[in-house]
Amino acid sequence: MRKLINNPADVVSDALRGLAAAHPSLRVDLEARVVVRADAPRTGKVGLVSGGGSGHEPLHAGFVGFGMLDAACPGEVFTSPVPDQILAATAAVDGGQGVLHIVKNYTGDVLNFKMAAELAEDDDIEVASVVVDDDVAVQDSTFTAGRRGTGATLFVEKIAGALAEAGAGLTEVAAAAREVNERTRSFGVALSSCTVPAAGEPTFTLGEDEMELGIGIHGEPGRERAELATADEIVNAALAAIHTDMPLDGAEVLVLVNGMGGTPLIEQYIAYAAAANWFEGHGVTVARSLVGDYVTSLEMAGCMITVCRLTPELRRLWDAPVETPALRWGR
Amino acid sequence: MRKLINNPADVVSDALRGLAAAHPSLRVDLEARVVVRADAPRTGKVGLVSGGGSGHEPLHAGFVGFGMLDAACPGEVFTSPVPDQILAATAAVDGGQGVLHIVKNYTGDVLNFKMAAELAEDDDIEVASVVVDDDVAVQDSTFTAGRRGTGATLFVEKIAGALAEAGAGLTEVAAAAREVNERTRSFGVALSSCTVPAAGEPTFTLGEDEMELGIGIHGEPGRERAELATADEIVNAALAAIHTDMPLDGAEVLVLVNGMGGTPLIEQYIAYAAAANWFEGHGVTVARSLVGDYVTSLEMAGCMITVCRLTPELRRLWDAPVETPALRWGR
């Protein structure tokens, strides 16, 4: 295992120290493992908390800031944060208007966020939760009952964050978050495995001419192990899977072509070209797009495509100013 | 070779189609292979052109936009752009105040930019050039007489771009670009090789417990092949090499901890934590910093550290608004 780390046991702590040093706009509690906007709590604003296993950076801590999350709680690599940690994040951002938990649909995350929400309610903090489950690749999987939560998380965090920043109440923010999740689908492909530092070995192995279609962001198996295809074929397969699940005809969409951590940006743009071509051929209007490493799986090679069917209101919220380490525009 | 591509021969063309589709703020001439700001040429503004081999994305095309480059001309992977291509970029951004060429110090790039500058002068376009050579790892190397140009390129493009945007003349913009280069040093470490698509095989191989200290951004050999060390040790070695070449005592610095394309962001933050610790221990003030994949080497694992000794004026120019696909703030 060749990794730029000190010790497998210290990966998350060391990275959080780096995050704190690099971003004065964040307040990082190294003990509680909570990353908060420096100006939290904001009185009168709904707080947004997300979190999950580490190894998906910049998700979630890179999305803490104006117009997006108020706090993130990173667990160990590919491991859910614990309830006390989520509770600490919730309390740190409670501005009196309640807190929204944005939870990716993995069994451990759902359970721990649920416990944290109950503890927060005991402390008189109102909590609403939205569970993100956008991945069309498989129904249940290694860590999941139902669909996995992947790229839609970024869209939910951005759009709900914009609404909360504008002063909307908890019910309205939670409803928008659910609407974004319902209108979004993802499909990922792996061209290599990743290695969890504590495991020291690749999570799975691929032959020289193989790929994994429908990969999960922890290296969970997808739909099938297939012969390596071209970027055009891979992207067409991903979009066909999404289109089958949620027809895109005539839609105006927000698209994320997402690197999984180990795929160079030049290849991500090749994938984006293929996607743009598919959309054009299917009469779909791409209103907004992102290309880059946003929801990663350590150093896995491959890409994930996430598509959201926009409404004019969702587009307006997507365009609203955001200022976080990993996403920023227009302020 | 498992890559997200269609055909090794089409990598640059396909990626440029993706770039064009993803960024309406750019005008991409697929024939001439020139990427230009959509509002170019800007009358009365010095034009900034950079370019070089592809495979280093987001460098350079990702830095085309307000407050940074006016044009980029991408060559084939790890191959200099040709003079006609550089000339086309130069002509496309000439607003009557001359054009600055920002050239990384590789033999082919220096030669081709020089020929393009002569051709431009024949067309009555005034051209100044700055050669970036910040890498302290080795003196001459595979593709270079003198030092290699690496991370400083980003700083030169940003700071010269801010000055040009503010209306400075060609002489002043070129002088600032040279000043940034002279005040900046870099050192890189590889934990894996990369594979040039047309070659189909890794450029070099490392043993399971080896790393390459002083790596170049094309996989050129560095100072030594050494036993894999911890992130702290690697970063300390890189900063010691920089500090030996350009003493940092008492300096106020701008720091880039740069992923080479295949290193997850969580590891880059671990490296940043080590760097912050080194700076604190050496009485160096980190005024500004960046962590991420900015000057890459396809999917190479590893990191490069780039340090610029700021002046108040350089810091002001660094902070000036910028709006490009890969770098944006404050507009």
Image (tube, coloured by chain):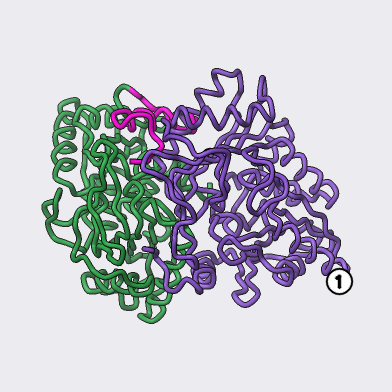
Chain colours: A purple, B green
Q: Front-most of B109 and B184?
A: B109
Counting other residues with Cα less than 10 Å from the Cα at mark 1, is it few (<14), some (14-19), or many (20 or more)? few
Q: How many marks?
A: 1
Q: Residue at x 32, y 70 (%)?
A: B234
Task: Say which of B139 and B68 sits in front.
Answer: B139
> Viewer-proximal residue, A311 or B118?
A311
Taking the spot 21% from the left edge, 42% from the top edge, the residue there is B128
Q: Position of residue B181 (x, y in %)?
A: 26, 57
Drawn side of residue A302 relative to residue B93, left or right: right
Magenta span? B1-30
Q: Is residue A85 above or below residue B19?
A: below
Letter of the chain that mark 1 sits on in the rendering: A
Residue A287: quarter of image: top right
Residue occupying image coordinates x 33% and y 32% = B12
Amino acid found under the numbered disc labelled 1: Asp
Q: Which residue is mark 1?
A: A123
Question: Is the N terminus of chain A in the top left, top right, bottom left or bottom right quadrant?
Answer: bottom left
Percent x, y for residue B320? Answer: 46, 52
